[in-house]
Amino acid sequence: MTGRPTKTHAPRGAVLDAVLGASLILVSVTAGCAPSSDLEGWDVTLVSVVDCSQTNVTVDCADPAVLGQTALSARWVIERSDTGIGVALATHEGITLPGWRFANDTTVADVPGCAGEGGQCTFVRYRAANIDANTAGCVRESSRVFAGHVLPDDATLLQGFFSDVAVTTEECGTASTTEQTWSVSARRVDDAVWARAEEP
């Protein structure tokens, strides 16, 4: 988690696309259909490290002096499959990102957040594409990715990166690519949800 983030987005997306293809195949084979009741609650702190989604930006959209001034606190919930490999992450936005968990040793994925730091890596992704039937070639895509690792010396700590990327093709009128990326630090909590129904 050291080093300044760059504004070069294509290589990172290409790596994540390759990892996603492998991860979805593995999850479909190993996760099974029956949900597990084993939920993990995580209190997360998100600090912006890239914000290239603003209009008329007058500062470097990866300037840590500007971006690191505001932090967001939230609750995430991770649900593990019966095998413990497939996972589903519910974010503070109410979006569920499917993915998987594996040994964090770079043999499976070497991406920001899972780069051989030890422990277990969690990689999840949500991706959607909207094709405009009235305008040939107009495509709007959005992708949310979290990659992070549970620390090897403390399984109650999680660190990684969460990104939100949106792409619009030029056939829609104006081609654009926007990105927001946050560094994530989290601590596991006993309750997976904020509140529980009272006993009758």
Image: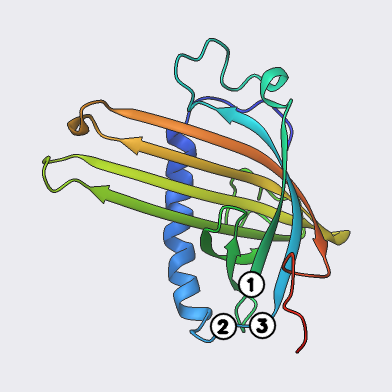
Query: Looking at the image, is mark 1 or mark 3 earlier in the sequence?
Result: 3
The kind of residue tagged 1 is Glu
Badge 3 crowding class, 10 Å Cα cut-off, few under 14, some 14 to 19, many 20 or more, is few
Position of 44 relative to 101 (above/below): above
Query: Looking at the image, is mark 2 or mark 1 earlier in the sequence?
Result: 2
The residue wearing badge 1 is: 79
Position of 97 relative to 5 (above/below): below
Residue placed furthest toward the right: 153
Tell me whether the residue at label 2 lies in contact with that at label 3, contact meaning CB atoms closer than 8 angstroms. Answer: yes
The residue wearing badge 2 is: 35
Tell me whether the residue at label 2 lies in contact with that at label 1, contact meaning CB atoms closer than 8 angstroms. Answer: yes
Residue 53: x and y in percent read 48, 28
The residue wearing badge 3 is: 37
Classify residue 169 as left or right of residue 104. left
Q: Residue at x 57, y 12 (%)?
A: 59
Front residue of 160 and 134: 134
Q: Quadrant of residue 83?
A: bottom right
Classify residue 137 as left or right of residue 16. left
Classify residue 67 as left or right of residue 8. right
Label 1 vs label 3: CA separation? 7 Å
